[in-house]
Amino acid sequence: MAPAESIIAIDSLEVLGVRVDRVDPMQAMKVIASLLDSPGCKQVVTLNPEYVIRAGNEPGLMRLINGSELIVPDGMGIVWASRLLGKPLKGRVTGTGLLPEIARLCAARDAGLFLLGGQPGVAEMTSARLRRDIPGLKIAGISSSDPGVADETTIEEINKSGAQVLAVAYGCPKQDYWIGQNRAKLSSVRVAIGVGGAFDFISGQVPRAPRFFRRAGLEWLFRLWLEPSRARRMAVLPGFGIKVLASRWK
């Protein structure tokens, strides 16, 4: 599929061979709105350093990400990398921040939103919160099925729902592989986005970092305090930074 530039003209940069689009939240929503107006299922990736490191070892993931229609800088490490490369991004564009805005767009367009993934019951709570906050929002369907377990059944359920937007919360990179492998089968979906832990945050199951932490780019530190098990995932950051610096020197 063509990159987002073919829908709305936006700039991009590469971080260790992985494309990231130079968008702020408002620009990202403009692109997503334009994707809704074009045929076929388009993929939106919320990029973080873990994706970039894995993509360096998994050519299929590299192709999948770079072939997506929109790639937003979700992780603060991506923003830091852009600064190291001398091509600074404006800031993060998170899946958690985008999902409510996408839901508002769906309500305005009378488009159905399907929530896929998350722990049992969490998508339902997310749906209730979004519908409470956004009058007129139509949740076309909800499923907590695991990726690869009931794909055909899940795809049939999504297609029957008539949803035009699909939010997938399987985590990195399962959600992106699932969208990439199945989007040709999604007949009504126009935009599919991997949203990571957005359901947990929106439903209130996991508290978001205070605004100060988010503005300072330290939300990762707050999450590490809440979930010490994330230390293993964050261990990639020093090596990621070294590789970014080395790529600039080259």
Image (cartoon, rainbow, N blue to C red):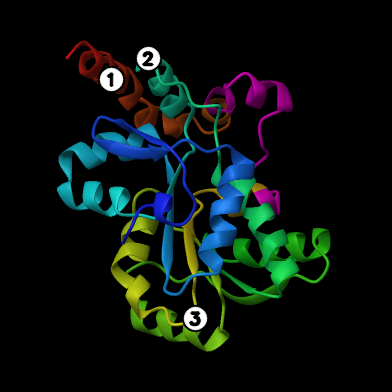
Q: Amino acid at mark 1?
A: Val
Give the image location of residue 26, x and y in percent.
Answer: 64, 43
Q: Quadrant of the N terminus?
A: bottom left
Quadrant of the image containing the C terminus:
top left
In whole angstroms, how far apart are the C-alphas of marks 2 and 1? 7 Å
The quadrant where residue 6 appears:
bottom left
What's drawn in magenta, residue-wise? 202-222
Q: Is residue 137 left or right of residue 143?
A: right
Say above or below: 73 vs 191: above
Mark 2 = which residue?
84
Q: Is residue 6 left or right of residue 250?
A: right
**Do labels 2 and 1 touch, CB within 8 Å?**
yes
Which residue is denoted by mark 3 in the rendering?
Answer: 188
Residue density around tag 2, few if under 14, some if 14–19, many if 20 or more, within 10 Å: some
Name the foreground residue: 91 vs 125. Answer: 91
Q: Is residue 223 visible?
A: yes
